[in-house]
Amino acid sequence: MNIYSKIRNLNLKPVPGEEEYTSRIENLNLSLEEFRSVHSVAEYIGVTPEFKRVIDYFHVPAGETPSGFEIELEVSADRVLRANLRRNISYDKNGQKRPTNLLFSADSANPYEVAPVAKLLSNLTCNPGIIYDLFINNPKANVGGVYKTRDEVLAEIGRILGPGCDISVELNDPFNKSDSEILEEAARFRELLSEYRVVIKVPHTGPVNKENVQQLLSGDKRLNARYDDPSVTDAFRGHNLALMLREHGYRVNFTLMFEPAQTALALQARPYFINSFIRHRLVQSKQMARLVQLYHGTGDRTVLEQLRGYMLEKDYLAAGEEDADLLRVLAKAETLLDQRSFYTDQGSDGLDGIRHNLRLLRQTNMDDTRLIICSMEGDYNYYDIDRLLASDEYGDMAHRVVLTAEPKYLARFSSANQVVSYQRRFMNAANGAQ
């Protein structure tokens, strides 16, 4: 049997002027061992300056501490037990852990669809496409055109989500802006959302740079540089941006991670979030495997032409490689499928990147870094991930995972057919039906 007591039972004297703050932690549980240890060394109770800043910024109701913060206790040399609030989205209000180690996030910038799920979320992710294409410039979503700017949208989302939810916002242009301009943009996000909630999304940049990015915006919008043949400077621009932002006090969501081989290098940038994108990679693997197997079964070179066309369309090949040698294209596809363990139980479900990333996270020296699993679709992605995180091998890593999707996708897995069946019975009974 575990025996607990509460801080108020220590009968410590509040530091003068801090009574309103210390009243917020008086019902915090201490184990019997903790209670005895503190009782022997503390005479007063107080809070840190950071505790006061958090409470005052979020206008937290009396007697409470906000969600999204862990309560830390320390005894100072002057025999004062001081409480601090440290950002930790695993915590609900009043220092209570969230219901599960696995946390949930939403991919959305639509306040109307965020509101119904807000209390279940610990993070929200949005990028320029989500903000502008899917919401501001979409009359069906932005009903009546109420929201005109990105800042208006973010301010409203911050209000809806409250203090407990991180908000990951992506840089508008990581290529043409100077470091000082990027820091100005990040500072605006921080002003809107607070230092406690804002996370800056920094993308992997690959072979894209300020000179060739216009190729993606005009003509056939094809890049003439191969994704796997970037210059060293271009390849690591995202990494260096992440490090620069971290040095200026920002947490970074290092995004556009599709291959597990990206992860170890990404972790060198000390991100707060890394990512595993699922949807398109698995679909593309299936299509390449279908064409590879069809060629080996028929020997028909037109199948390889289809494969080449598909790999051009999906940017495995660059502009100018329309006549690439067909056997070289075949070898490239077979290498990718092998790297993705596509023909084994480690990768046939498209979750090889998740497995790899969780293994790497076990080895990191960054306990606060989490994996965002994103870009899900269809009938199996959610179920497969759910099973994986409940398994013996990965269950211990669920506290390092944030599962994110469009609210509509998450909603479909909150129900079952018999919800309808039973509600039919219950509601008819309640309404007196025979």
Image (tube, rainbow, N blue to C red):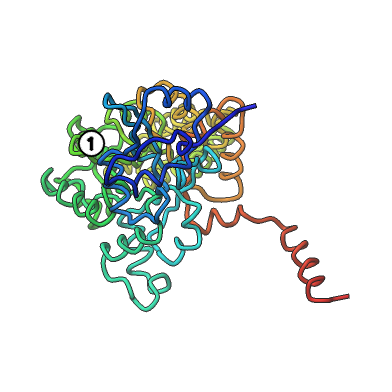
Q: In this rendering, would 433 be left or right of 182? A: right
Residue at the location (54% across, 28% down)? 396
Can the viewer see residue 434 in this picture?
yes
Residue 169: percent from the left, percent from the top?
A: 30, 51
Query: Tag 1: residue type?
Result: Arg
Q: Quadrant of residue 15?
A: top left
Q: Residue at x 47, y 29 (%)?
A: 358
Residue assigned mark 1:
246
**Could you tell me which secondary element the residue under label 1 belongs to?**
helix
Asked if residue 176 shows in the view, the reply is: no
Give the side of residue 100 with respect to residue 329, left or right: right
Residue closest to the eye, 156 or 327: 156
Residue 233 % position (x, y): 17, 32
Going 61% across and 34% down the picture, which residue do you hit?
390
Q: Quadrant of the C terminus?
A: bottom right
Q: Depth check: 194 or 52 in front?
A: 52
Which quadrant does the N terminus fall into? top right
